Amino acid sequence: MFAQFALHERLLKAVAELNFDEPTPVQVAAIPPALEGRDLRVIAQTGSGKTAAFLLPLLNGLMGDPQPRVRIRALILLPTRELAQQTLKEVERFSQFTFIKSSLVTGGEDFKVQAAVLRKVPDILIATPGRLIEHLDGGKLDLSEVEVLVLDEADRMLDMGFSDDVQRIIGCCDKRRQTLLFSATSGGAALREMVAQVLRDPLHLRLNAVGELSEGVRQQIITADDTAHKERLVAWLLANETYRKAIVFTNTRAQAERLSGLLIAREFKVFVLHGEKDQKDRKLAIERLRQGAVKILVATDVAARGLDVEGLDLVINFDMPRSGDDYVHRVGRTGRAGAEGLAVSLICHTDWNLMSSVERYLKQQFERRVIKELKGSYSGPKKVKASGKAAGTKKKKLDKKTDKAKPAAKRKPTARRPKGDAPAPLVSQDGLAPLKRRTREE
Ligand code: AMP
């Protein structure tokens, strides 16, 4: 029950309006200390309800002590435009019964229009770092009275090279502010340094860390001979799976374009989303998917972060993402807020090692799936013949009833957890370092 939190009744009214019955674990853990004004460093899975976990206490603070609106009082920094737009929507939903005003400043939108919006001084500013710096350089933006600073997806902001911008922005905010830092992963040395520098005696909360994707999501792989084979597999899955909405992820823009062209030629209704698309097209693609006018999005990782589309229940990895974190961010688009989902990764010989490392990272084995009509010749690296003893152990794993190997997904993980890393939810210090990261921060 949300009534357990000491939240203003207008916020509780909004929560009820949104049909949020029970708070999620991250909300239970983060809302009370945030309401007390503590700095927080939270590791929480995408889709865990973390936005409300920081927004509700933030809004509550702004309501408790009404002041004439002369300065920006809260700043929420995020890595991507999509995530910023989504967060603005959440702020508007939660503040619908209040007088709190919020605005958005991101790249890809008209600078002058934004400057005019800033002159009206919103209570809450939601921004991406690059564009915010441009406004600071313009000399018209005053952040010196920011009481609450939220750094959302802080790991991603650093991965994207925003470290200097973020540091500079933080330096412009009131030193007495409350800071709430959220990330999906424990991050590298750069993030640890930021936590040490920016937060004051923070409470560390770790909930559903990376590697603990929503349990309602089945994760499968299908082996493929080459790109053309993958394309046939995607078309088959989109035609034969039962789903409400789907995203197909590719590693490159060129592949996203090519694949969407092929799918359109096969009369699928598809939108394509990647970094080269202009802001208008990106917005339109997400809006159409949300409304259900289009069921399928072909996208690069730009879309993976933070995209929250209701009813997204199929994720296809055309290429294996380059790191375990990226895999979690892609697959985390489905199974949000406890819903069911399916994630299928297409694996040809160049994806195999990446796939194995992601399995080790997640400490689980993906279910192997074969589509009879499209069975290829590649099925993974040739197995080394097992020695007598090991072969004997293997036999014991056969299912007595069917005499078939037990489904891979049900096998217990064998990889060892790093010391001190217990299953979430729990409250602890950082511990889990990704096996493979695209950018090294140490
Ligand atoms: P987030 O992790 O903040 O992106 O949230 C994921 C989705 O869960 C969003 O669509 C939220 O609106 C929804 N959500 C967050 N908290 C709750 C809750 N307590 N009950 C139901 N849905 C929720």
Image (spheres, rainbow, N blue to C red):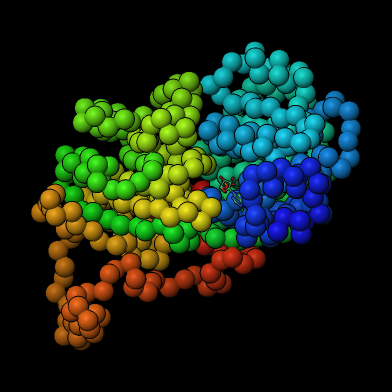
User: On screen, 402 above or below 376?
Assistant: below
Total number of numbered labels?
A: 0
Q: Is residue 112 visible?
A: yes
- Asked where in the image residue 118 lies, by quadrant, the reply is top right
| Residue drawn at the location 19% of the way across and 57% of the way down | 370
Answer left or right for 10 relative to 78. right
**Residue farthest toward the left in the current orientation of the protein:** 377
Q: In front: 423, or 177?
A: 423
Seen at 10% across and 54% down, the residue is: 377
**In the rendered view, does 47 fall on the left or right side of 229?**
right
Question: On the image, which quarter does residue 17 sit in?
Answer: top right
Residues 423 and 416: in front is: 423
Quadrant containing the N terminus in the rendered view: bottom right
Is 48 left, or right, of 230 in this rendering?
A: right
- Residue nearest the observer in this picture, 350 or 124: 124
Residue 22 image point, x, y percent = 65, 57
Outermost top residue: 112
- Figure check: 100 above or below 152: above
**Residue at the image position 31 percent from the left and 30 percent from the top:** 269
Whether 351 is drawn above or below 307: the answer is: below
- The location of residue 26, given as percent across then percent down, is 63, 57
Residue 218 x/y as whole percent: 37, 58
Left or right of 364 on screen, residue 129: right
Q: How far across and how far down the image is residue 361, in percent?
A: 41, 61
Please indicate, yes or no, whether residue 357 appears anywhere in the rendered image: no
For image coordinates 43% across by 34% down, the residue present is: 292
Instruction: Note whether 194 is above or below 267 in the view shown.
Output: below
